[in-house]
Image (tube, rainbow, N blue to C red):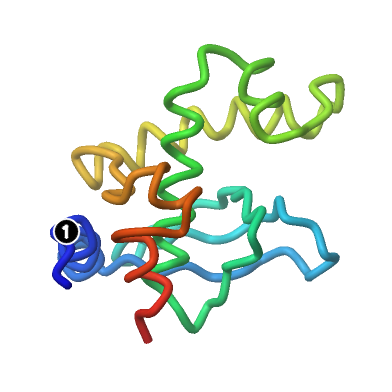
Amino acid sequence: MEYPELNKLIQLQKDFQLRVEHLTPSDNSTFFKVRFIIKEEAWEVYIDDEYKYFDVSKQLLCIYLVLSALEDYQEATDYLQWCKHNGLNASEPLWLDYYKELGKSHAAIESKLHRIDSCISSFDYQLRAGAFSALLNQG
């Protein structure tokens, strides 16, 4: 079955030479830092990988997870809501500093991509269905 959403994500990866590298050592945490690369520019972004899908050998999946994290930031009305969504302690200075930096990173990434769009619905992600299921089966 063809999924236009998946094809859109594939095209986005090709057009902007998107890549993701894992930065944080594995500590079984589902919230960790990655490097998101557009052509030769890079930003550090934390992603929430609650289902432990992240695998650097599956770059398209990693790109989806980063774009989804950027959408979560975009949709949060404020710092407290963003912390709650990600299960973070809002009184931890690390997260406030990161949130402020994420605002700058988000704006820079959005200007490069023209729009931040993970292409695949969060509904498909949560149900592991449709286009997200096809994404999981990508090599």
**Can you give x and y, in whole percent of width and height, for residue 75 in the image?**
44, 23
50 shown above or below 105 = below
Q: Residue at x 30, y 40 (%)?
A: 116
Packing grade of label 1 (10 A; few <14, some 14-19, many >=20) is: some
- Circle 1 sits in a helix, a strand or a loop, which is it? helix
Disc 1 marks a residue whose amino acid type is Lys
123 shown above or below 83 = below
Q: Quadrant of the C terminus?
A: bottom left
Q: Residue at x 51, y 20 (%)?
A: 76
Q: How many marks?
A: 1
**Can you give x and y, in whole percent of width and height, for residue 74 in the image?**
43, 26
Q: Which residue does the numbered mark 1 point to in the structure image?
A: 8
Q: Residue at x 17, y 72 (%)?
A: 1
**Can you give x and y, in whole percent of width and height, for residue 121 in the image?**
34, 44
**Can you give x and y, in whole percent of width and height, for residue 100 in the image?**
60, 25
* Residue 54 sits in quarter: bottom right
* Residue 27 sits in quarter: bottom right
Q: Residue at x 16, y 58 (%)?
A: 8
Relative placement, left or right, of 22 versus 121 is right
* Residue 25 sits in quarter: bottom right
74 shown above or below 69 = above
